[in-house]
Image (spheres, rainbow, N blue to C red):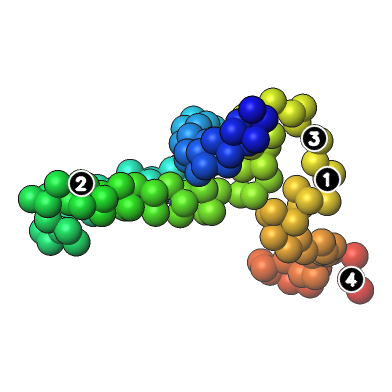
Amino acid sequence: MPRGRSRSTGSFSWLQELVQNARLTWRLLRDPRLSPWVKLVLPGFLLLYLLMPLDLLPDLFPLLGQMDDLLALLLAGWLFINLAPRWIVEEHQEAIRGAAPQPRPPESREAERGPVIEARYRVVGDSGDGPPEGSP
């Protein structure tokens, strides 16, 4: 009996992964930390595909006509998840699995923002009249 359970679980693992990706996509769309531009990828891609005058497979063929629509939806979801910051995606994946979220070290947050330039400045001269203050 255990053999049958593991076999059925293995054969439906793609379905479980599909459901988890759908939940992840929904959670990412509702996350306020994600850029609105990234959030526009999913609906924008799908809207472009639906407004395209040519269909890869016409809907006249039963099931095959809808497969290209499903493929477009899956591709848009994949693109959306891969454009989202990795640490936000991992945080939501842990929450979906039920694991306690792991705190991220500060250096990984800084790496997400890009390079930081630290500098000091001093005022050399006034853009107005005369030499700077304190000069002879």
State the CA–CA distance, disc 1 to disc 2: 49 Å
Residue type marked 1: Pro
Position of residue 58 measured from the top left corner of the image (x, y, whole percent): 12, 55
Position of residue 60 measured from the top left corner of the image (x, y, whole percent): 8, 50
Give the residue pinned by disc 2. Answer: 63
Residue placed most toward the observer, 45 or 35: 45
Residue type marked 2: Leu
Position of residue 32 measured from the top left corner of the image (x, y, whole percent): 54, 32
Question: Neighbour class for label 4 at 10 Å: few (<14), some, many (≥20)?
Answer: few
Question: Please, what secondary structure does the residue beneath circle 2 have?
Answer: loop
Give the residue pinned by disc 4. Answer: 135
Give the residue pinned by disc 3. Answer: 102
Q: Residue at x 52, y 42 (%)?
A: 11
Vertical arrangement, residue 20 with respect to residue 44, above or below: above
Looking at the image, is mark 4 or mark 2 nearer the viewer? 2
Looking at the image, is mark 1 or mark 4 nearer the viewer? 1
Q: Say whether marks 2 and 3 touch (CB < 8 Å).
A: no
Question: Please, what secondary structure does the residue beneath circle 4 have?
Answer: loop
Give the residue pinned by disc 1. Answer: 106
Question: Please, what secondary structure does the residue beneath circle 1 have?
Answer: helix
